[in-house]
């Protein structure tokens, strides 16, 4: 049973470009969460999605960031017009049902903005 | 608001030493508590969890007890190995919302 998959594992962008991060949840999981880990810090919640719905985006910056989890395909975290401060590791997690369930994490995407 | 505080690292131990990593939390309601481990360059792996007061989570020789009276969830292991070297994160799921709140992480280095 494959775990949570994320790609790419490493992504380099220049300032002003767009970054697209993908997350495929564990088989049978319909809830996806995105977290950001800045250097030397713990993980911070960004957004919680179910299929075709955003449940909680209270941790997402108001501008340039968006997330979706379509009916078919992976969840996408999109960062437009990246800046150096966006450099971080972005982790996706999934759970089987509601927020009460244990979350299982992917390997992360490490974004470097030059 | 809800928060998690972990002891600062790095913690450096010799192989077979006893490990304690302190974790205290602030939360309303009855959160679930977790310990995750992150090896270099990898994602987080669930180490153990506890869902209610007095529950003890255990896995791979690690254990932690959910203490509501002291709002703590300290991680312990009786005899550490070099392979346990990693960053350990304490986390809570406030009111089971799915919005995990993490501590800042504690780096453990085990020397042979």
Image: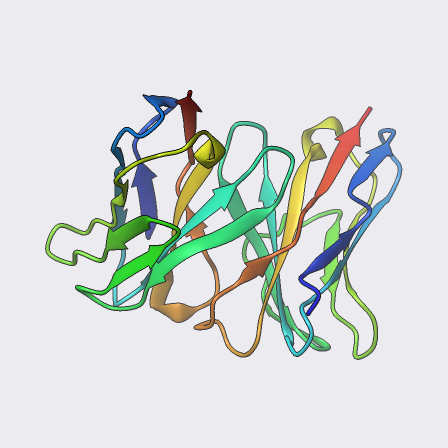
Total residue callouts: 0
Can you tell which quarter of the image residue A67 is in? bottom right
Please state the horizontal and vertical placement of residue A90, each as a whole percent of the image: 66, 45
Residue A46 sits above or below residue A11 on the image? below
- Colouring style: rainbow
Please state the horizontal and vertical placement of residue A27, each as a whole percent of the image: 69, 74
Left or right: B48 with respect to A34?
Answer: left
The residue nearer to you, when weighing B88 against A63, is B88
Residue at point 13%, 50% (across, down): B70
Residue at point 59%, 33% (across, down): B40
Residue B34 sits above or below residue A72 on the image? above
Left or right: A96 with respect to B31?
Answer: right
Can you tell which quarter of the image residue B58 is in? bottom left
Instruction: Check the picture and name the quadrant holding the C terminus of chain B.
Output: top left
Residue B21 sits above or below residue B33 on the image? above
Residue B26 seen in the current view: no
């Amino acid at each position: 049973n494959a775990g949570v998959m994320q790609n790419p594992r490493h992504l380099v962008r220049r300032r002003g470009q767009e970054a697209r991060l993908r997350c495929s949840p564990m088989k049978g999981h319909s809830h996806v969460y995105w977290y950001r880990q800045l250097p030397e810090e713990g993980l911070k919640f960004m957004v919680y999605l179910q299929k075709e719905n955003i449940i909680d985006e209270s941790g997402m910056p108001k501008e340039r960031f968006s997330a979706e989890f379509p009916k078919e395909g992976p969840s996408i975290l999109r960062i437009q017009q990246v800046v150096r401060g966006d450099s971080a590791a972005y982790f996706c997690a999934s759970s089987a049902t509601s927020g009460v369930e244990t979350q299982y994490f992917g390997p992360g995407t490490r974004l470097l903005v030059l | 608001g809800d928060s998690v505080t972990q002891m600062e690292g790095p913690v450096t131990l010799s192989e077979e030493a006893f490990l304690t990593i302190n974790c205290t939390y602030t939360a309303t309601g009855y959160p679930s508590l977790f310990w995750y481990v992150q090896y270099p360059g990898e994602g987080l792996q669930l180490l153990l969890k506890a869902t209610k007061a007095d529950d003890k989570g255990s896995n791979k020789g690690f254990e932690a007890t959910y203490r509501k009276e002291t709002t703590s969830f300290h991680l312990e292991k009786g005899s550490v190995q070099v392979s346990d070297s990693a960053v350990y994160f304490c986390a809570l799921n406030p009111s089971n919302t799915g919005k995990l709140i993490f501590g800042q992480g504690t780096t453990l280095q085990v020397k042979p």
